[in-house]
Amino acid sequence: MSFMTVLSDPPVGSFRLSMLIYDSKYRSYTFQFIALMIVISLFAYLGSNLLTNLQAAGLNISYGFLGESSNYDINQSLIDYSSRSTHLRAAFVGALNTLLVAFLACITATIIGVIAGVLRLSPNWLVRKLMAAYVEAFRNVPVLIWIIIIFTILTAVLPAPSAFRGENPDATMLFGAIAFTNRGLYLPAPIWGPGSLILGVIFVASIIGVFAYRSYATKLLFDTGRLLPMGWPSFAILILPTLLAYFILGRPVTLEYPELAGFNFQGGIQILGSLIALWWALAIYTGAFIAENVRAGIQSVSKGQAEAAASLGMRPNRTMNLVVLPQALRVIIPPLISNYLNITKNSSLAIAVGYMDITGTLGGITLNQTGRAIECILLLMAFYLVISLTISGLMNVYNNAVKLKER
């Protein structure tokens, strides 16, 4: 009787330099280290070459220009800004504008995508075909074209502010407080009085209460099978405490309505047409991709799951919300992260309609005025890198929280 022993690795013993090549345990680390050294050397060479060329041209990398006066206006700003502000503040204004449109577009695109994705599987032939036409039309046309189309429609169709003037105006304000014009949308602005901070805290607590109630109702359903209503209790928790506090505190929040003065509206909040066009173009365009992700996620769930829920007497909408979609999220979320990143990066097309995001401020006017192209581009790259990594990290945390956990 004979025995054969196959050894893929040498017996464990004292470490020798030859093991870095001949031992499979260490060989992979050796090659990775060599590759890392090559990459570091390449970047060091490129950086050294850049600094040498800059010195030869009499240039040096400096960010002192950020403290200089910008000397240009920005059409929409979430914080106080004037042409006497610094380039750093102008860049900060542009960054906030970028985050604003990206946030609005992500939320709107998710809502549109989920609705369209579910309707893509509707048993109604007409609804199903309309959603298919929406998906194919919007995702196969560049987003820049949709931005220009929506902006052109807004400026060509909507009336000018002067149309709201006179005894018989050509246009009327919605509810006497909202004006849609070719210059943008005018809304009432809140005026925060004494007690408004308390009111805000109560409203935030109400939002937390809604999530807490829905979490409790879901846990109760899974543990005992008892089904609590979701809709009206959530609405009551969200609205009633804030509404009661509003009157008890003596109406601490009032509204400033936009009024026509001269050739434009004064007061209130103005949302530029360029922001609306960019927001909705990004939302509708990306929503078409999200719709396909949602459709694929729903179809990845076995039909037996829905049939089992129906056999228990669950209505179709509850089957979708409680059975199908939670299982489909494992397929939906990973590509959804890429769609959110695309929205953030595609927002740099804002300059096409004159919306001043960070690309238009730091990467546009500031760069042209100061001539600091390398510094501005490096800051732009760092901004988009940080935002993209933040979005990816948060979505991955959420993905790990909702993914299926095997027993």
Image (cartoon, grey):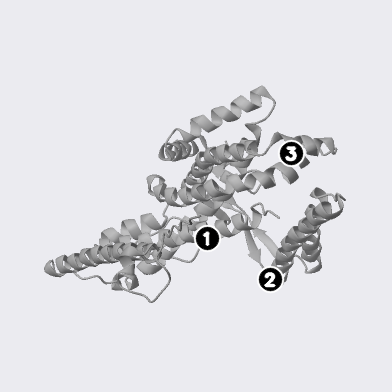
Residue that carries the numbered disc 1 in the rendered image: 393
Figure check: 364 above or below 204: above
Residue 110, percent across and down?
Answer: 59, 46
Q: Distance between the residues labelled 2 and 1?
A: 32 Å
Q: What is the tally of numbered marks visible in this picture?
A: 3
Q: Is mark 1 on a helix, strand or loop?
A: helix
- Neighbours of disc 2 within 10 Å: few (<14), some (14-19), many (20+): few
Figure check: 145 above or below 383: above
- Residue sitting at the far top: 125
- Neighbours of disc 3 within 10 Å: few (<14), some (14-19), many (20+): some
Instruction: Indicate left or right for 203 with 279 as reference.
Output: right
Q: Distance between the residues labelled 2 and 3?
A: 47 Å
Q: Earlier in the sequence, mark 2 or mark 1?
A: 2
Instruction: Indicate left or right for 239 with 351 as reference.
Output: right
Q: Is mark 3 on a helix, strand or loop?
A: helix
Q: What element carries label 2?
A: helix
**Residue 131, quarter of the rendered image:** top right
Instruction: Indicate left or right for 204 with 178 as reference.
Output: right
- Neighbours of disc 1 within 10 Å: few (<14), some (14-19), many (20+): few
Residue that carries the numbered disc 2 in the rendered image: 197
Q: Earlier in the sequence, mark 1 or mark 3?
A: 3
Q: How far apart are marks 1 and 3 (CA)?
A: 31 Å
Q: Which residue is drawn at 64% across and 58% down?
A: 401
Figure check: 10 above or below 129: below
Residue that carries the numbered disc 3 in the rendered image: 305
